[in-house]
Image: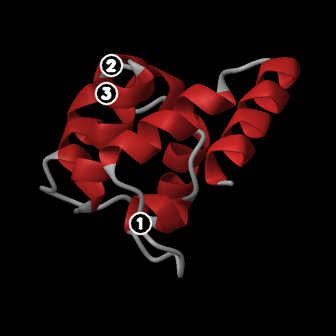
Amino acid sequence: MSLGERIQQTLDLKKISQTELARRLKIPLSTLNGYVQERYMPDCFKLKEIANALDVSADFLLEISSSEVLNEEEVALVVKYRGLSEEKKKVGLEYFRFLGG
């Protein structure tokens, strides 16, 4: 999956529009759309800002992490987990430990 596809996938999973992300980054929508459509690439500083705004790592966006890349369902689970209260996170982790045996 390419950088642009990763950005769009994360936007979709977090229900953030390109317009909203561009506003958060203080860049023109056309610039963000250029990254998503891969007409051009963000520099390392802008990539870090994008990752921070989306609450993911730059490694995730670039797919350079040494760990296995998450599929769409796994990414959705992580996004939902991060949105839970601390108490619900504990309950969820206990449930996953139960499922894992």
Q: Residue at x 67, y 31 (%)?
A: 82
**Which image quarter is the C terminus in?**
bottom right
> Reading the chain from its start, which is encountered first: label 2 or label 3?
3
Alpha-carbon distance for marks 3 and 1? 18 Å
| Total count of labels | 3
Mark 3 or 1: the one toward you: 1
Q: Is residue 29 visible?
A: yes
Residue identified by numbered label 1: 69
> Reading the chain from its start, which is encountered first: label 1 or label 2?
2
Residue, far front: 101
Q: Considering the numbered disc 2 on the image, is that residue within a helix, a strand or a loop?
A: loop
- Whether pointer 3 and pointer 1 mark residues with C-beta atoms closer than 8 Å, the reply is no
Q: Residues within 10 Å of mark 1 (few under 14, many from 20)?
A: few
Mark 1 or 2: the one toward you: 1
Q: Nearer the viewer, residue 62 or 97?
A: 97
| Colour pattern | secondary structure
**Vertical arrangement, residue 2 with respect to residue 21, above or below:** below
What's under tag 3, amino acid-wise? Asp
Residue 7 is situated, as x and y percent measured from the top left of the image, at: 34, 45
Quadrant of residue 36 in the image? Answer: top left
- Whether pointer 2 and pointer 3 mark residues with C-beta atoms closer than 8 Å, the reply is no
Q: Which residue is drawn at 45% across and 21% down?
A: 23
- Circle on res. 17: 2
Residue identified by numbered label 3: 12
Q: Residues within 10 Å of mark 3 (few under 14, many from 20)?
A: few
21 relative to 38 in the view: left or right: right
> Reading the chain from its start, which is encountered first: label 3 or label 1?
3
